[in-house]
Amino acid sequence: MTRPDRPSSNPSGKSPSQERLSLARKQRSRRDLDQFFAECIQYLEVQSAAHGKSDSLSEGIAAFAFDKFGALASNVLRHWGINSPDELERCFCEYLRACGSRSTGRTAGFSQSEALKALFRGEYWP
């Protein structure tokens, strides 16, 4: 029992087992998001090779997310902590840097894409 005159050593109020579970969920979500980005890059490369054209990065990401998750794409991204196109752009750039890619210039401003905005609103239908 915690005495009221002593500050709690755990400011979140969660038990150690709840803290471990929360951390494990965050790590699993990050792994899932990294896997999504890896698959997305492969998808974009295949689409580019197959069609001989390169759609914008944002349109490719929106199309891949919709192909993979359908109408639930925005819910899946939100489950991973991605609540807006800006956050998606930030996480995608972080992923590219972590992979050692120096080509993050292509991602600049893709969060302003109408395709991604529509995806997060649940209105994206290719």
Image (spheres, rainbow, N blue to C red):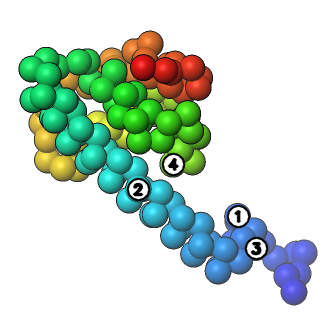
Nearer to us in this view, 20 or 64: 64
- Can you identify the residue that label 4 sits on? 80
Nearer to us of marks 1 and 4 is 4
Earlier sequence position, callout 2 versus callout 1: 1
Q: Is residue 42 above or below residue 109?
A: below
Type of residue at label 3?
Ser
Are circles 3 and 2 on residues that touch, CB within 8 Å?
Answer: no
Label 1: state its secondary structure.
loop
How far across and down, in percent of the image, does residue 37 sit? 31, 44
- Can you identify the residue that label 1 sits on? 12
Distance Cα–Cα, label 2 vs label 4: 8 Å
Instruction: Please tell me how crowded label 2 is: few (under 14), some (14-19), or many (20+) other residues with Cα within 10 Å.
Output: few
Residue 64 in the figure: left or right of residue 84:
left
Nearer to us in this view, 93 or 29: 29
- Can you identify the residue that label 2 sits on? 32
How far across and down, in percent of the image, does residue 34 sit? 33, 52
Type of residue at label 4?
Trp
Earlier sequence position, callout 1 versus callout 4: 1
Are circles 2 and 4 on residues that touch, CB within 8 Å?
Answer: yes
- Can you identify the residue that label 3 sits on? 8
Nearer to us of marks 1 and 3 is 1
Distance Cα–Cα, label 2 vs label 1: 26 Å
| Residue found 27% across the figure and 46% down from its top | 39
